[in-house]
Image (cartoon, rainbow, N blue to C red):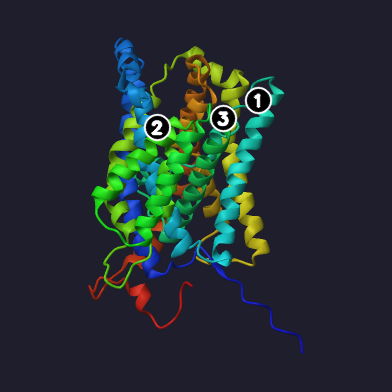
Amino acid sequence: MAAAPRERSPFLGLLPLPERTAITQALRTETVGGMVLLVAALVALVWANTPWADVYERIRDFHFGVPALGLDLSVGHWAADGLLTLFFLVAGIELKRELVVGELRTPATAALPVIAAVSGMVVPAAVYALTASAGGGSTDGWAVPMATDIAFALAVLAVLSTHLPAALRAFLLTLAVVDDLGGILVIAVFFTSDLNFAALGGALAGLVVFHLLQRFRVRGWWWYAPLGLTIWALMYNGGVHATVAGVAMGLILRTTRDKDEDRSPGERTSHLLHPVSAGIAVPVFALFAAGVSVTAGSLGEVFTTPEPLGVVLGLVLGKMTGIFAGTCLAARFTRARLNPDLAWADVFALSTLAGIGFTVALLIGELAFPSSAAAEPVKAAVLLGSLTAAAVAALLLRRRNAVYRRLYEDENRDDDHDGIPDIYQTDTDTGH
């Protein structure tokens, strides 16, 4: 007798309750931070295109610090190298949580979102490289359109008043987390300056101490804060972008709870720093990175110069094509069954939304094109590409908002007011 076909695993089905709770808390903070980010970017754009633009530039380029420690940086660089370290620290913690207790903890569940995310990095980079090469431009900016800005994307969803089911939001978050890891690996490997091996050795030794403190359950911020600052300073002086230190420490922090703990060290740190990262660090970086001069000539340059054109096409077409194609292929070869309440059109819309590549794209753009003259058109391309992706995604998502609203209400209904959605208290398994 022929064997029965193997049951295919669900894709974008109901999340396990603990995973849904953790993701909801993280995305709530990111959504608020995304709104602040949008305001900061708008302020930067307006300010840089007023008669007071020279004041903006003087503030951004003002230097301060401790020269004796090799830390005499401009305000813009303090925001990019310093404040964004908090962003990457939180990203590292989220990645560690996903790997240890989240959706990425088993190869079967990790395969589909990871393949989709990798495709969503490789294809935009290839689109940029092909566009720049065809136009006789520089391929140095191949990594600019690789990363998704989760805060900006969630802010767009908030403005649209969409009610995406938790599974779709979780998939978007997973894409962004893997993208962030890819972005930081690109920064660490391809955008290093004159390496100081003594300083790098000191940073590595600091990370070992950080690991030992975690291993032996040493508690108290007074141990970790000075050590973290020291690791950051040594990493910066070592010639590797200082944000790498944030990801490294995030990955080291323990995300599993001991019996006597209400929260793990990773959870406590994320709870403390996530609002600071989303509400202060990233918006301040945006304030000093998004201030580009917008004129008819500069906008025309985006579409007539190969480098910025490659960025726009990479974010809009590359992300959309890469993530959607990667998801479809991965679903086919992993035998994943799409949630019957959703359609592949929803995955396509989410793939388009992932073309919003604001924060990390701007950071990589500054690293890939150090001169202001070359960086300004690329920054303008990041802004234009992200806005275009947001606009197209808005049209696609609004068409399905009635479906999303129904699913959102179903998975949040709590008629008995016990704090647990009723959908998790049924006798039948509606998700996993």
Figure check: 180 above or below 20: above
| Residue underneath mark 1 | 132
| Spatial separation of the CA atoms under disc 1 and disc 3 | 9 Å
Q: Residue tagged by mark 2?
A: 81
Please report whichever mark, 1 or 2, sits nearer to the chain's N-terminal start: 2
Q: Are marks 1 and 2 in contact (CB under 8 Å)?
A: no
Residue 176 appears in view = yes
Q: Residue at x 30, y 21 (%)?
A: 64
> Mark 2 and mark 3: span between their CA atoms?
23 Å
Q: Secondary structure at mark 1?
A: helix
Q: Give the numbered dot on residue 311.
A: 3
Q: Residue 340 at what x, y percent from top left?
A: 53, 67
Residue found at x 37% / y 48%: 90
Closer to viewer: mark 1 or mark 2: 2
Q: Indicate the position of residue 138 as horizontal and vertical percent values.
A: 64, 22
Q: Nearer the viewer, residue 65 or 338?
A: 65
Q: Is residue 43 above or below residue 167?
A: above
Q: Amino acid at mark 2?
A: Asp
- Residue 329 occupies which quadrant of the picture? bottom right
Closer to the camera in the image, 93 or 142: 93
Picture quarter with the N terminus: bottom right
Q: Is residue 93 left or right of residue 304?
A: left
Q: Position of residue 50 (x, y in %)?
A: 32, 13
Marks counted in the figure total: 3
Under mark 1, the amino acid is Ala
Tag 2 secondary structure: helix
Q: Of the residues under marks 1 and 3, which one precedes in the sequence?
A: 1
* Sequence-wise first label, 2 or 3: 2
Q: Are marks 1 and 3 in contact (CB under 8 Å)?
A: no
Q: Nearer the viewer, mark 2 or mark 3?
A: 2
